[in-house]
Image (tube, helix red, strand yellow):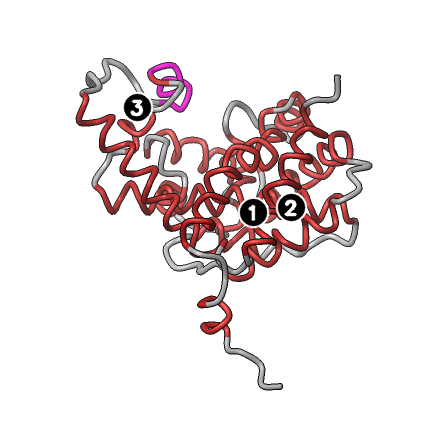
Amino acid sequence: MTRMSDSEERSVAATTSTTLDAVLRSKGPIGSLGGAWMTSDAEEQATLDAGLVGWELYFLARHGVLGVVDADVVTAAAYVFPPDHVRANWERALVKHTPAEGVQLYLPLLYAWAHEHLEGFTDGARLSQLAGRIIGSATVSGLPLFAGWRAVPLPSDSVEALALRLNVLREHRGACHGVALTALGMSPLMAILTGEGGTQNAEEYGWQPPFPEVQASDQTLRQEVEELTDAIVSRAYGILNESEQADFVSLLDQAYQKAFDQG
């Protein structure tokens, strides 16, 4: 039997509407499962243990996969933060640790969180396998932070491998969101102001008031950005057929319940 090409396999994958539905239903769980560990008490302690303060570990460790680069390169990936805030934290952190060391400071936090919250999730291997196919099919064009995290070696421990892949999926959506903001001309600050956290998040991320007033047109543009983000993300999810997409969404929901609804 002649094997189908990758393009042919994609053409017989789930329809665009079902793929988009899978993206919409999975983005919430992925955001939580892939990122909760970065705001844990353990992360704060690791910052102190590494001799770092404030946002220094976050910028060095999360963006350390980019290598030794100028702060503008980090800003290009960490687009929701003010450039001066990125530069200050990145350069201070580089005095104390290399980017590679930063990544190695972060990975144990991710894996420890996974063992605490996902240990015993019986269908983790299947979820990890489906996530790996999505990650492997995604393009890295314009998505440097996703590309960097995708290149991190997969651990042999199954729980840790699942955690890393969930983190990479979160980075994938985040990078696609940055592309959508740029494509539609929405500023990072306005993207934050039109989001759920509004001005509180803006100040937490380092932006300084007074902030521009959010107009109805800004909210409309934000919705367009979200829709474009979903469309870009769905290109990778189309590698799964309709049944696999349903499994992926269901397993994500189960993993979320395992991690966050433990009574």
Relative depth, front residue between 201 and 215: 215
Identity of the residue drawn at 37% across and 17% down: 203
Identity of the residue drawn at 36% across and 38% down: 79
Direction right: furthest residue: 120
| Dot 3 or dot 2, earlier in sequence | 2
Tags 2 and 1 in contact by the CB under 8 Å rule? yes
Look at mark 2 in the image and give the residue it sits on. Answer: 164
Residue 112 is tagged as: none
Look at mark 1 in the image and give the residue it sits on. Answer: 168
The N terminus lies in quadrant: bottom right
In the figure, is residue 97 to the left or right of 179? Answer: right
In the figure, is residue 244 to the left or right of 59? Answer: right
Rounded to the nearest angstrom, the CA distance separating label 1 from label 3 is 25 Å
Q: Secondary structure at mark 2?
A: helix
> Is residue 204 in the magenta section?
yes
Q: Which stretch did the figure color magenta?
A: 199-206
Look at mark 3 in the image and give the residue it sits on. Answer: 194
